[in-house]
Image (cartoon, coloured by chain):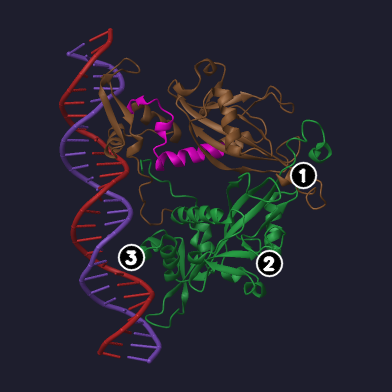
Chain colours: A green, B brown, C purple, D red
Amino acid sequence: MKAIENHDTKSNVLFFTAAFSVDITLFTYSENRIKVLLVKKEDEPYFGKLGLPGKLIKPIDDTMSALNAYMKSLIGNDRFHKKQLKAFADVGRHPLGRVITIAYYGLIPEKQVRANSMEELLWTDISKLPSLTYDHNRIVESSLKRFRKDLLRYPNVFEMLDKNFILSEVIDIYEQAFNTDLDSPNFRRQLKDNELIRPVGETRYSVTQMGRPPQVYTFDKKKYKGRKKEPIGLRF
Amino acid sequence: MKAIENHDTKSNVLFFTAAFSVDITLFTYSENRIKVLLVKKEDEPYFGKLGLPGKLIKPIDDTMSALNAYMKSLIGNDRFHKKQLKAFADVGRHPLGRVITIAYYGLIPEKQVRANSMEELLWTDISKLPSLTYDHNRIVESSLKRFRKDLLRYPNVFEMLDKNFILSEVIDIYEQAFNTDLDSPNFRRQLKDNELIRPVGETRYSVTQMGRPPQVYTFDKKKYKGRKKEPIGLRF
DNA sequence: GCAAAAGTGTTTCTCGTACACCCATGG
DNA sequence: CCATGGGTGTACGAGAAACACTTTTGC
């Protein structure tokens, strides 16, 4: 890249002194709770404090590739649903200098996290988030908003559930996300009406070992053909 | 800022060699068309080519403040609706080095652009966009998607219309944005039912000088109390 | 009068919601 | 048998969409 060779020319020295990073709010559904992944920071300014997973990116590296490599090292997997949220660029947000972070949010099924790392990782209930380093509380807030928005418009729940799941898990995620009670009969209908899920054989198991054993479903990703076009109207 | 003093320390020299910029897709409604603002680039790599308004940001500057100052100099106004879209960070997107751009989109009424600059500015019909510098065509694409999405959820049309407007202008914007024909009787009802607009006296004028002269309306920003809560359902 | 755009009224249909009720299991 | 959660059926009501019809201007 030219930048590196040029970074001391008269015009560029003024601008090419910033750094950038990626941070990710990774959601999963574990022990019947929606959780986000936190890490203990091992860099200097905030050593030992809790924050979102993330790291500085070398100016020659692609952000997504760097994020993938990082996640692979952290949870043994980089193949999960992720999307860029937006950039956080407040002047004072990083003690080492001007660091712009590109925030992502992601969804992963608990089972796809490398088993032996699952226990040492700090999966934290979204309703019990502690104070975080940098501006990470703000980032989590934004991620949660986007997470909720997307739950209504994309079949994202299935990206955080195991290949085989039961409907009450789906409902539970929506109830926690929107902090409300849903009418389970109606919600089931909506789920089944859009034909994206399919009962997988007679298999069945239960969560609390009470009541009628639920049907096991699986998500048929191929059947999903983009967003349902929404009516052009004024929803405000 | 520490960064500037520290930027030659062993650990930081690796990271603090990137630059960042802001770019904005600014929409308006002019001559009955939705348009975006383009500029002729005067920096070296793409001198003379068309692109989105935008510039490199000094690492000590706040992005929003820098954007505001820039827009003031460009169109004589920085008080218009704007929102961050997301960051564009492809490795090869800028010929001078690693430059991450934070993309905004904005809405402004034609009348609030400084009059004498209105004519020299390149307001371009969104249906006739030329090839742009850098990755600006991709940025415009993203902006258009977001613009459309937000039209359905926020009273954003009014941010690109004059204080006094007529309903057919509103409908026209929606029709152009979604490239479709709308049922004007029903759309009028929706507009008037949500009580955010109010007819301003007997005043009236017409666009094509044909047919019955329309009522003039004004948007009552105070009456808007945040997003209407949408039902928790599966719209996919 | 006629054309053209503004604006109103009415009917139909869809979909979200409420809720009564049945099913299958463990104890 | 009862408790508990899984699951189906039905009925009502709000709001979107379709469309017939009236109003007000210029020519």
The residue nearer to you, when weighing A146 against B222, is B222
- The answer to whether marks 2 and 1 mark residues whose Cβ atoms lie closer than 8 Å is no
Say whether residue B68 is left or right of residue D15.
Answer: right
Q: Is A198 included in the stretch rendered in magenta?
A: no
Above or below: residue B129 compared with residue A55 = above
The chain under label 1 reads B
Which residue was labeled with disc 3? A183
Q: Are marks 1 and 3 on the same chain?
A: no
Above or below: residue B151 compared with residue A79 = above
Q: Could you tell me how many numbered marks the image carries?
A: 3
Q: Which mark is residue A76?
A: 2
- The answer to whether marks 3 and 2 mark residues whose Cβ atoms lie closer than 8 Å is no
Report helix, strand or loop for mark 1: helix
Q: CA distance from mark 3 to mark 2?
A: 37 Å
Q: Are marks 2 and 1 on the same chain?
A: no
Q: In x, y percent, where is residue C14?
A: 31, 51
Say whether residue B124 is left or right of residue B180.
Answer: right
| Label 2: how many Cα within 10 Å (few below 14, some 14–19, many 20+) | some
Q: CA distance from mark 1 to mark 3?
A: 59 Å
Mark 3 or mark 2: name the one nearer the start of the chain.
Answer: 2
Q: Residue at x 33, y 63 (%)?
A: A186
Our reading of the magenta stretch's main secondary structure is helix
State which quadrant residue A52 falls in: bottom right
State which quadrant residue B74 falls in: top right
Which residue was labeled with disc 1? B5
Q: Quadrant of the N terminus of chain B?
A: top right
Q: Which residues are magenta?
A: B141-167
